[in-house]
Image (cartoon, rainbow, N blue to C red):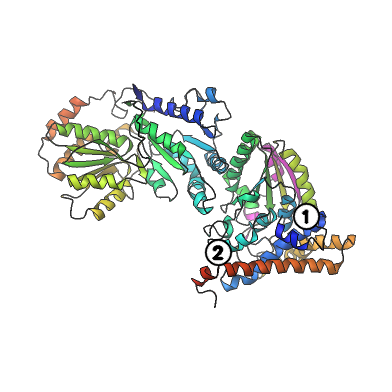
């Protein structure tokens, strides 16, 4: 059966609350009519307002409260409708949650999930569209995961709630209505394992979250030109699956990285550095990196169009950088034909109009 | 309450007598911190220390009201809170020298003391940040229907943080069993309140206005603190959160082993005043006036406490001989 990202998150919350009485779920909007974009629908009525509850607009104190609960054996899941809001609780996340287990000499486990939704488009602008995976991945003591598909969301959330470490769960708003066949694997994928979305031999594309969807599209387009592109969905950012990435590049000898965060001091720099150190001499071309420029994300739709890497642009740069022999105009034509934009506007996700965002 | 010291003196003293128990606790904390102060120059305690000398009556008056299972969360100035709740002295000394035998395996130091076995859940040296965590500890107790309470110590500068007000709102909203102990020593490092608070700031109205029961009391007389805390705890156990505002003084420098009277940020008359406010002196005079034990006996009690503290310190040095040798600190 095919299910959306949001439906599967709702399902995994339901399953976790049902199977473990220590799980608590709270955040702004969990009990209201919007139900955090539908992801928390019916949870409060099914599990009661003691376990699923609305919070005052005090993210810092509530994040500390999550820590106190975890220190007493509960498994809190706290959510932010925008990742940007979590910065008001940076003190509790970085100074307290990330360090409590270590600093207590392992007396405490800190099974806390901080779910953060990343906005994009439709005027989200500077303070509603940031993807802070690199910021939190920089802090020892935090796990960071970023699902790209509904099944990723299901497994990663399940494992995040079961984890004894604090997990930052980065979730792109544009993935919410994506669909994937729901198959319960007998073998649950390892929590920190990357997922190879498509096998190939000519080039490795590495990305996370919504970027993976764009990489898959690029690979699909280029397959029409006899290029076999491998696509790696990192899933876990901290720790990240070096082995899968390096094995792939040993084979393809070429790598492109696409980040949903900013370029400098971020994921693409970190991953590149490891590839260059471990596979020095193996690469046939320098690594190609795409990420957001070092400017805040603009609100204006027209300015935002130039802020995010476009598939047309990436197809162009891939061709010239790696010296592939395809006709750019034809490739863009294939892209538009294969993936017609269902939304009227480019600053809305192409799965149909479901705004506001 | 430290049980080792109780065992050591119970033959000679009536340890069930509340005054004796209070004096013993006050003196124990004082002796520990005077030893830290004295040995600090030897570079054995290799971390910042925030001494509680002058403020001990608060920790003792609070802790003697608590059950072992009641939870406490403290601040950067945590020694007195830790010891009075029954924290392990050997593990505390070990932590202060950075040893893996310390209560945080040497990862925390003086500012992160914890002893979960006695309900001392931890110390948070970011001002104001202990309170959000206390909120979660208390919500857990409420969800578990344990009837246990959480004590959160904060200093006066916490009233300048957002975390403080966010937490009080949550505590009142959820009717959590939290007793906030506000240790008001007037200074944030060297800064008096006059550069931090508006003249018209009214703490009582602020706290009561947020739905928290409030009392203000002197923090110098351990008996007064004890009885006021006792009153408040009966509310807190019924999920009526309270804040007890205690006026106190920090005799030593903000951070470090020394007096800092020479710096001049505290006026000489203010410093003179501290002598008459010393919690140990106040209780000592009360005990001697009541003639329950003689001055000679009381001095012997002090001596025994000093011997216990000294012996524990020597034991820690011996246990950590190899550890300390790494840094060539023992000749």
Q: Is residue A44 magenta?
A: no
| Cβ atoms under marks 1 and 2 closer than 8 Å | no
Res. B13 in view: yes
Q: How many marks?
A: 2
Query: Percent x, y for residue A343?
Result: 29, 23
In depth, the one of A48 and B314 nearer the eye is: B314
Residue at the image position 78 percent from the left and 47 percent from the top:
B228
Residue B212 falls inside the magenta stretch: yes
Q: Which residues are magenta?
A: B189-218
Name the residue that disc number 1 marks: B222
Q: Which residue is pictured at 18% across the width and 42% down the height?
A: A203
Q: Is residue A146 above or below residue A282?
A: above
Q: Position of residue B198 (x, y in %)?
A: 65, 49
Residue B36 in picture, x, y percent from top left: 63, 67
Q: Chain of mark 1?
A: B
The tag on residue B47 is 2
């Amino acid at each position: 059966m095919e299910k959306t990202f949001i439906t599967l998150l709702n399902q995994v919350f339901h399953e976790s609350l049902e199977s473990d009485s220590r799980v608590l779920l709270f955040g702004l909007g969990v009990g209201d009519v919007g139900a955090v974009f539908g992801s928390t629908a019916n949870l409060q009525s099914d599990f009661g307002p003691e376990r699923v509850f609305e919070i005052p607009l005090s993210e810092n104190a509530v994040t500390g409260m999550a820590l106190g609960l975890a220190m007493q054996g509960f498994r809190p899941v706290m959510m932010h409708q925008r990742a940007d809001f979590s910065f008001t609780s940076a003190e509790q996340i970085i100074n307290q949650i990330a360090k409590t287990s270590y600093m207590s000499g392992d007396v405490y486990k800190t099974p806390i999930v901080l779910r953060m939704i990343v906005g994009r488009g439709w005027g989200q602008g500077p303070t509603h569209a940031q993807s802070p995976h690199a910021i939190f991945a920089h802090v020892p003591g935090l796990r960071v995961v970023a699902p790209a598909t509904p099944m990723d969301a299901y497994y990663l959330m399940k494992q995040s709630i079961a984890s004894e470490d604090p997990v930052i769960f980065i979730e792109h708003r544009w993935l919410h209505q994506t669909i994937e066949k729901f198959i319960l694997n007998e073998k649950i994928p390892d929590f920190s394992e990357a997922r190879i979305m498509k096998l190939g031999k000519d080039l490795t594309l590495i990305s996370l979250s919504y970027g993976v969807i764009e990489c898959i599209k690029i690979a699909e387009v280029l397959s029409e030109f006899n290029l076999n592109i491998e696509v790696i969905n990192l899933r876990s950012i901290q720790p990240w699956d070096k082995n899968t990435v390096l094995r792939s590049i040993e084979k393809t000898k070429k790598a492109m990285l696409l980040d949903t965060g900013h370029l400098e001091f971020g994921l693409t720099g970190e991953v590149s550095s490891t590839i260059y150190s471990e596979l020095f001499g193996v690469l046939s071309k320098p690594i190609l990196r795409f990420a957001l420029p070092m400017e805040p994300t603009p609100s204006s739709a027209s300015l935002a169009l130039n802020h995010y890497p476009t598939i047309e642009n990436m197809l162009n740069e891939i061709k010239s950088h790696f010296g592939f022999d395809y006709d750019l105009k034809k490739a863009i034509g294939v892209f538009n034909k294969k993936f017609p934009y269902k939304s009227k506007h480019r600053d809305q996700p192409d799965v149909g109009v479901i705004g506001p965002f | 309450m430290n049980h080792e010291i109780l065992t050591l003196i119970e033959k000679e003293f009536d340890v069930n007598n509340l005054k004796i128990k209070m004096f013993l606790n006050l003196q124990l904390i004082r002796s520990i911190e005077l030893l830290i102060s004295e040995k600090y120059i030897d570079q054995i305690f290799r971390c910042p220390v925030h001494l509680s000398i002058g403020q001990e009556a608060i920790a003792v008056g609070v802790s003697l009201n608590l059950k072992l299972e009641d939870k406490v969360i403290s601040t950067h100035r945590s020694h007195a809170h830790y010891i009075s709740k029954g924290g392990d002295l050997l593990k505390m000394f070990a932590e202060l020298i950075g040893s893996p035998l310390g209560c945080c395996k040497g990862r925390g130091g003086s500012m992160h003391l914890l002893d979960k076995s006695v309900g001392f859940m931890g110390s948070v040296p970011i001002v104001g940040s202990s309170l959000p965590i206390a909120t979660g500890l208390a919500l857990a107790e409420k969800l578990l229907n344990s009837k246990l309470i959480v004590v959160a110590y904060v200093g006066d500068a916490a009233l300048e943080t957002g975390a403080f007000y966010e937490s009080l709102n949550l505590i009142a909203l959820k009717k959590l069993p939290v007793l906030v102990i506000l240790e008001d020593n007037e200074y944030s490092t060297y800064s008096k309140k006059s550069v931090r608070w508006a003249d018209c700031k009214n703490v009582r109205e602020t706290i009561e206005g947020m739905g928290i029961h409030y009392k203000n009391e002197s923090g110098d007389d351990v008996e007064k603190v004890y009885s006021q805390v006792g009153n408040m705890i009966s509310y807190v156990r019924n999920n009526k959160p309270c804040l007890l505002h205690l006026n106190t003084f920090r005799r030593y420098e903000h951070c470090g082993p020394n007096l800092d009277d020479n710096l001049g940020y505290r006026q000489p008359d203010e410093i003179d005043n501290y002598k008459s406010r010393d919690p140990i002196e106040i209780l000592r005079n009360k005990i001697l006036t009541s003639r329950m034990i003689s001055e000679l006996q009381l001095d012997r009690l002090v001596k025994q406490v000093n011997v216990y503290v000294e012996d524990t310190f020597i034991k820690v040095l011996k246990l950590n001989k190899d550890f300390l040798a790494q840094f060539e600190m023992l000749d």
